[in-house]
Amino acid sequence: MSTISVVIPSRNDAQMLASCLAALARQSRRADEIIVIDNSSTDNTAAVCEAAQVRRISVDLPGIAASTAAGFDAARSEIIARLDTDSRPPADWLQRIEAILDKSGPLSAVTGPGDFYGSSRLVCWLGRHLYLGGYFRAVGLLMGHPPLFGSNFALSADVWERLRDAVIRNNPCVHDDFDISYHLRPDMAVYYEPALRVGVSARPFESWHSLGRRLAMGVTTLRVEFAEEPPLRRRRERLQGVVERRR
């Protein structure tokens, strides 16, 4: 059995965070440590972490990328799992992650989909099949492997050790999950597991402003990544690496 750290970036989202920590407390396979990255919150995030007896790390540098990287740096386990504050993992979430990564090799990552909650059936369906489904299909085609979904993924500590100096930390307009996905090297395996599901809040679809902000971050992220490494060259090298791993 491997040890598992769960990292949760948070900013002024104490109520959602409390529900996420409660879901983690019900895991059939408990986390060896839970780390909440408090990105300059002004609500009662600190009190929620203290009540749940989890580790809280303060990060002043703004943005989800900085928070996630700080949490992964601080993790002390062999597997690092990632959730958002609005993620609702089922009771077997960590058990599934451990089973997949324990048998997949030291340079591996796993991700799964989300089931949206908190809005109408139509909005949740569209979020799951168009918004999130489109992300997995389009970005997967671009990268040559499934992209990681920030609300629901895990990777080995060995993967993070290789990536930690390459990922973007100082740009608050970059999606951390896309950035980590883009920096994965050809010798690193990524698994998409449909059964590895978590609940995810539909609040990105509450307003056009909220949705537009996320899409604008996506455009910025693409520009940053493509400037660092051309996408076609990256995809070609990735697919060559897959062929070599299968030999």
Image (cartoon, rainbow, N blue to C red):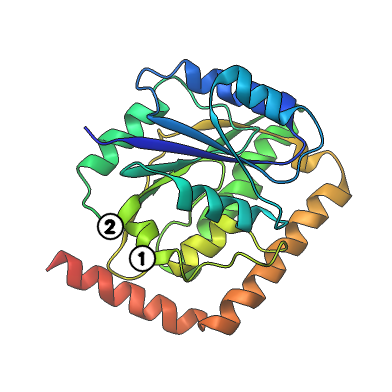
Q: Nearer the viewer, residue 139 or 172?
A: 172
Mark nearest the camera among 2 and 1 is: 1
Q: Is residue 194 above or below residue 52?
A: below
Q: Is residue 112 visible?
A: no
Instruction: Kindly indicate whether the residue at mark 1 contacts the one at mark 2 (C-beta within 8 angstroms).
Output: yes
Q: Is residue 152 visible?
A: yes
To which residue does mark 1 refer? 162
Q: Nearer the viewer, residue 145 or 84?
A: 84
Element class at badge 1: helix
Element class at badge 2: loop
Amino acid identity at mark 2: Leu
To which residue does mark 2 refer? 107
Q: Residues within 10 Å of mark 2 (few under 14, many from 20)?
A: some
Q: Earlier in the sequence, mark 2 or mark 1?
A: 2
Quadrant where the N terminus is found in the figure: top left
Q: Position of residue 212 (x, y in %)?
A: 82, 56
